Amino acid sequence: MEKLEVKNLNHHFGFTEILRGINFRLNKGQVLSVVGPSGGGKTTLLHLCAGLLDVEEGSVTNTFTSSSFAFQDARLLPWKNVIDNIALGLLAAGEKKSVAIEKSKKIALEFGLEEGDFLKFPKDLSGGMRQRVSFARALVVKPSLLFLDEPFSALDIGLKKELQSILIEMISKKEISILFITHDLMEAIRLSDEILLLKADPGHIVKKFSYDLAQNRRDDEYVYAQSAKILQDEKIIDTFELEIK
Ligand SMILES: Nc1ncnc2c1ncn2[C@@H]1O[C@H](COP(=O)(O)OP(=O)(O)OP(=O)(O)O)[C@@H](O)[C@H]1O
């Protein structure tokens, strides 16, 4: 069975301890999010899991057959147009150019881009359009594991909902597993099977929250109710320093 398993993971930058004793497992078809305050080490953890940083102590075992990323800042290649940006991963995986272009056009339309946008360069796109391209590029390769770093934080409410709905459909069909980090508890509750709460100095997991209801059955009422509940949790109050002083 495909899995991502993190065991006794520690990380330092220079003499500063960033992460201590991180343990968790993400199984195929699961969505796991890491929430916590700024500077707590979420991005570092995601980068270690994704192989973008070298693991120094402990282990990260990733047996998923394929993975891809979408970041908060879309990170498109400025010298490539929309379709060429989306096609990058497919070409890197050895797909024929004509097939890669066809698949990229198809997914671009699914993600709400229009034919008139296909030849545009990133500098001529709005932030929201760049984010659509970034998502399309991450998903066109049909990854079995998707890493997301605050992917919705720069988006307006409508676009956020639209992209989340696309993900929820994929999650419900068990087409994808996701590890993502966010500041946004409501977003985490809407999408996750499990939320890991990461407290800072050094980053360590203080609590896990599980959500059993299928993602495509979580309406706004469910998300608001669960958010209200989690905001009463002592560990959440302490970790996010929510106490009114
Ligand atoms: N390459 C690096 N070299 C040195 N220190 C780093 C490096 N990357 C991150 N840090 C430090 O590690 C700590 C954790 O950063 P990280 O970006 O992982 O936190 P985060 O929880 O993702 O924060 P945010 O939510 O603000 O993005 C911070 O104090 C940061 O300054």
Image: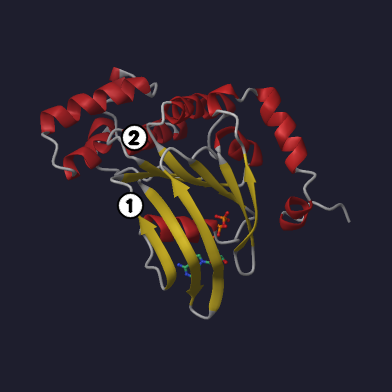
Q: Is residue 67 left or right of residue 211?
A: left
Q: Secondary structure at mark 2?
A: helix
Question: Where residue 161 sits: x, y (%)?
Answer: 54, 26
Frontmost of labels 2 and 1 is 1
The C terminus, quarter of image:
bottom right
Q: Is residue 167 left or right of residue 99?
A: right
Q: Is residue 242 above or below residue 105?
A: below
Q: What residue sits right under mark 1 in the picture?
A: 63
Q: Is residue 57 above or below residue 98?
A: below
Question: Which residue is at a point 35% across and 46% down the rendered structure image?
Answer: 2
Question: Where residue 141 sits: x, y (%)?
Answer: 27, 36
Q: Nearer the viewer, residue 51 or 73?
A: 51
- Three-letter amino acid code of the residue under disc 2: Leu
Q: Residues within 10 Å of mark 2 (few under 14, many from 20)?
A: many
Q: Residues within 10 Å of mark 1 (few under 14, many from 20)?
A: some
Question: Which residue is at a point 25% across and 31% down the rendered structure image?
Answer: 83
Q: What residue sits right under mark 2 in the picture?
A: 139
Tell me the distance, in whole angstroms, between the alpha carbons under discs 2 and 1.
19 Å
Question: Which residue is at a point 59% across and 33% down the rendered structure image?
Answer: 190
The numbered disc on residue 208 is none
Q: Is residue 182 left or right of residue 238?
A: left
Q: Quadrant of residue 57?
A: bottom left
Q: Quadrant of residue 52?
A: bottom left
Q: Quadrant of residue 107?
A: top left
